[in-house]
Image: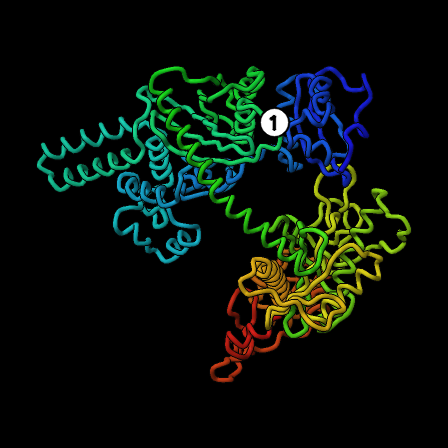
Amino acid sequence: MADPSSYRPRPGEIPDSPGVYRFRDEHRRVIYVGKAKSLRQRLANYFQDLANLHPRTRTMVTTAASVEWTVVSTEVEALQLEYSWIKEFDPRFNVKYRDDKSYPYLAVTMNEEFPRVQVMRGHKKKGVRYFGPYGHAWAIRDTVDLLLRVFPVRTCSAGVFKNAARTGRPCLLGYIGKCSAPCVERISPEDHRELAEEFCDFMAGRTGTYLRRLERQMADAAEEMEYERAARLRDDIGALKKAMEKSAVVLADATDADLIAVAEDELEAAVQIFHVRGGRVRGQRGWVTDKVEEITTGALVEHALQQLYGEETGDAVPKEVLVPALPDPVEPVQQWLTERRGSGVSLRIPQRGDKKALMATVERNAQQALVLHKTKRASDLTTRSRALEEIAEALDLDSAPLRIECYDISHLQGDDVVASMVVFEDGLARKSEYRRFQIKGFAGQDDVRSMHEVITRRFRRYLAEKERTGEWADGQDADTAGPGVGDVASDGRPPADGRVVADDGEALVDGPALKDDDGRPKRFAYPPQLVVVDGGQPQVAAAQRALDELGIDDIAVCGLAKRLEEVWLPGDDDPVVLPRTSEGLYLLQRVRDEAHRFAITYQRVKRAKRFRSSPLDDVPGLGDTRKQALIKHFGSVKKLRAATIDQICEVPGIGRKTAETVAVALARATPAAPAVNTATGEIMEDEDGAPETTTDAPGEPVTAGTPDERRGQER
C-alpha cells in the first residue's frame, strides 16, 4: 500500500487548465481515469488527509503509485479523451456499467443488396438500421412475425438464401406469404429495398400513413366486391395494430427522447434507460455499477451518457435526453451530444406533465433493478468468499488466493500437444487473461515434462517483467529471466506489434508484447497467489520444480486429480481431501474444468488446421488466388500432381518457373492417407478410382472407431 505523499506532484507543477489525468499502480497499470476543468484543483482533492477521503477513493490513492495528466484546450476535448481512455485501459476504479452489450436489437441490413430483418447484439455495424434495444429476443421475433404479413421482407441467412436461389425453390415463408422471395426473383431488388424502407419507416413510428393506406385499399376492395382481398387487408390492419399495441403510447406529441434514471446507495448505482421513439417506448436497458469513489448523481449521469452515446452518431442520439440530475458543468456534455448527433440536443430535467410521469416510471424500474442486483450479489459474494477462505484453510495459505491460475495439457495420442492457462480473480473467470501454449521443447507425449515447460515459460515472463520495471527482490538473480517460445494470445490473432513469429506462423509473446508505460494489461505480468495444475503428484512436482528453478518461492502450488477429486500438494505423500459439499472444492473444479475446456478447444483447432493443410501451402510465392486457380483448372490436387509442367503453365497466371516449383513441391509431398468406411472397412475412392479422404466436419478426416472411442483418445 503506497503513501500518496510519495508520488504527490510538487506545488506549481500541475497546470491550472482543462485536462485528463491517470493514476497508475506499481505495475504501471492505469487504475483510474478522470477529467477536470482545472487539473490543479481537482488533483489537490486526492492528496488531502486520508481520513477525509471517501473509503473507496482512499483505496484508490493508496493503490496508486503515480499520477500523470494530459492538458487539452476545452472541456469537450477532455470529455472525449476521458471516454477513449476508459475504453482503452479499462481502469478498475472507474465507474463501469455492466451488461451494455447484452441487449438485442431489431436490425435491418440496408447495406446488403436484399436487406434482411434479424436479431442482432453487440457493436453496431455501418449501414444497418437498428430498432430497440428490446428486453428479450422473443419480443423482437413476435413483432417481426406480425409485420411480415404486411411487409414480407427477407429474414433468412445468407446460406439459406443462396441455397434457395440455386434450387429455384423458396423457403417456407415464401410459400405462406411472409417473404416476398427475392431469392427466386419474385420481386426485384429495387422493389424489395422499397419494402424494407417501408418496414423501417413503420418501426420508426410513422405508422399512420400505412394504416390509412390499408384502410383505403380495404374499402376499395369491398366496393368492388373483392371480399377475399378485403378480408386479407383487414387482417393486415389487425396485425399492424397488434404490433403497435406492444409498445404503448407514452408521449402524445410523437417525441423522440431517451429517459435516464438513477437509483443509488453508498456502494452501488443502477441506471435505467427508456428509449422513446414516435411517442412510444421502443426499448429499455439497465446497467449496474460499483461506486468506486464519492460521486454525485450528475456525475453518474455523465458516465451513463458517455457509455450510451460514445460510439453513436446521427439519429441514434435523440433530440431530447431527460435525466434526473444534470452533469456539472452541463455545457460541455450538451455540446458533445450535439456534435455526436450533428444537430441540437436538449439535455434537461423534466418538470411536469407526461414526461415527468414517465420519468417516475423509469426511476421505479431503476430502484427495482438495484434491489434485485443487491439480492443476487449478496449471495454470490458470500459464496465466493467462503470458497476462497476454504481453499486458503485447506492449503494452509497466509491469505485467500484472490488470483488463481490453472494449467492443463491437451493432445491427441501425443500429436498437437498444447497447454492452457486460465485465470480466476475473486472467484470469477477473467477471460482476457487466458493464454495458450504450444509445447515445442520436445516431441511426443509426456504430460509431466509438458507441465514443467509451460510453468517455466510463463514465470520467466513474470520475472522478465519484474526485471524490466526494476522490481527485483534482494538476492534475486535477473539472469534467470529469459524468453520462451511458442506462446500465443487467447484469441489466436497474429501479432501487430513486431513480435517474433515461429516457423509455423504462431504468434509469440516475447519482446514488445510486454509493453512499456501504456497502462494496458501486460501478458504474464502479474503473479497468482495459487497455481493449480490438472493432475496428481507428478504434475504438481513438475510445476513446483519449475518454480524452484526460477527462484520463485512465494506462489503456492496444488493439483486436482480427476479420479477422486483429490487435492495434491508438493512433497506430500497423501492428498488433501475436501468435503464433497465444499464451496472451495467446487471452485477448484470449475477452474480445472475451464482449463480443460480451453486446452482441448485449442488442440482441436490446431488439429483441424493441420488436416486442412495442402501441399500447395508450402510453395513459396503461391497465394490463395493462384492456388484456387490451379485447383479449379485441374479439379483436385491428385490430378494436379499427375500434370506435366507444360499443362500447369496453361493455367492463367502461372509461369514456367512457378509451374516447376509447384511440380517439385507436389512430388516431394506425401499423398493423403485413404479414407476408410468404418462400418464396412472398405477404402473409399473418388470418381477416378483413387482413394479419397472423407470428412465428418470441414477439413477433419474420419478416423477409425466410434465417436465415443475418438473422444476417448483426446486428452
Give how far across and how far down residue 274 sits, in percent: 41, 30
Look at the image and tell me whether residue 271 can be seen: yes
Q: Residue at x 62, y 70 (%)?
A: 715
Q: Tell me: 153 left or right of 481.
A: left
Q: In this view, does 262 lie to the left or right of 184?
A: right
Identity of the amino acid at label 1? Answer: Glu
Q: Where is residue 565 in the image (x, y as percent from the top left)?
A: 60, 68
Residue identified by numbered label 1: 294
Give 165 or 608, whichever is nearer the viewer.
608
Between 573 and 177, which is closer to the camera in this rendering? 573
Q: In which quarter of the image is the N terminus?
A: top right
Where 213 falls versus 689 (above or below)?
above
| Image-quadrant location for residue 61 | top right
Q: Is residue 337 above or below residue 379?
A: above
The residue under the point 71% across, 27% down is: 50
Q: Is residue 73 left or right of residue 471?
A: left
- Whether residue 363 sits left or right of residue 170 in the image: it is right
Image position, residue 671 (x, y; %):
64, 74
Q: Which residue is drawn at 38% across and 53% down?
A: 165
Residue 100: x, y in percent? 51, 38
The image's colour scheme reads rainbow
Q: Is mark 1 on a helix, strand or loop?
A: loop
Residue at position x 27%, y 52% from top? 175
